[in-house]
Amino acid sequence: MTVSGLVPSSSRRARLWAQMLPCAADAPSDCGLCPRLKAFRNAQKAPHPDWHNAPINGFGGLEARLLVLGLAPGLRGANCTGRVFTGDGAGELLYPVLQQRGFAKGGFGHGGADDLRLIDCRIVNVLRCVPPQNKPIGVEIRQCRSFLMHEITLMRELRVIVCLGGVAHRSLITLLGQRQSVYPFVHGVHYTLSTPEGRAITLIDSYHCSRYNTQTRRLTPEMFQDVFRAAAALLA
Ligand code: SF4
């Protein structure tokens, strides 16, 4: 499948990546903690030299009170454009909903050539590198959790985390030292938990906004709106 038209030009790509201000929770661009993922990333460089082909770090300020936790970059999505939820179908649902709830401003371009800004919101994936067939394995989720832990520690104002899908949910529950049986993934559920430093947070679960989930109507736009309406109400 060709992706011409999705890849921003060099100047647009530079502008896009400039929005991704580095922070202390970032994975290094050559992170090799997951050999399988590093090899897969590197294998994309020859056929797709214009793609990002590196770990995708968080988007939005660390001072945000809302964290949206996704699964992993898509091969032709974030792995290509360099920004979470940009370049494939999931962002086409997520970003407009964030805009409607006041968590994003500016235009959203499918390829990321835009002036989109997040407001009081940060987005990151539990896995920062694209996995083959979109399927991470457990050891990779565990390896990347160290970056997520650092991220949550740095987000001193964090109050609400929206987990997109069961993998993100379970990774967060483990990170917070809780038992999965006590806090199962349920779309729309709210759990009151605390960060490792003892700060209270609310976890809200949502089905992932993947194209598969929206096409099968497991997740409707109305259901997704309700999730972020609830997050906005908690932060009002
Ligand atoms: S998934 Fe995370 S831990 Fe693994 S190589 Fe990528 S950045 Fe490093």
Image: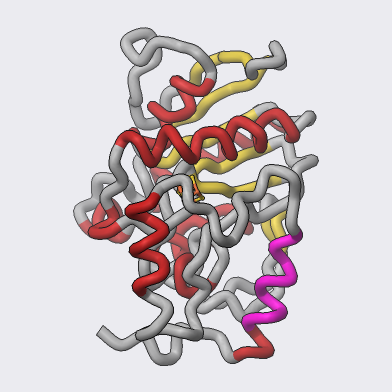
- Image location (x, y in percent) of residue 112: 57, 75
For image coordinates 74% across by 71% down, the residue present is 18
Q: Name, please, the residue furthest toward the left.
A: 216
Magenta span covers which residues? Answer: 13-21
Q: Nearer the viewer, residue 212 or 71?
A: 71
Image quarter hosting the C terminus: top right
Question: Can residue 30 be seen by looking at this rendering?
Answer: yes
Question: Can residue 100 be seen by looking at this rendering?
Answer: no
- Image location (x, y in percent) of residue 188: 41, 30
Task: Report the side of 193 relative to 218 (left or right).
Answer: right
Q: Please say whether residue 20 is one of the residues in the magenta stretch.
A: yes
Task: Report the side of 176 relative to 184 (left or right).
Answer: right
Would you place residue 27 above or below residue 63 in this image? below
Would you place residue 128 above or below residue 1 in this image? above
Q: Please say whether residue 52 is one of the residues in the magenta stretch.
A: no
For image coordinates 51% across by 64% down, the residue present is 54
Q: Nearer the viewer, residue 50 or 39?
A: 39
Image quarter hosting the N terminus: bottom left
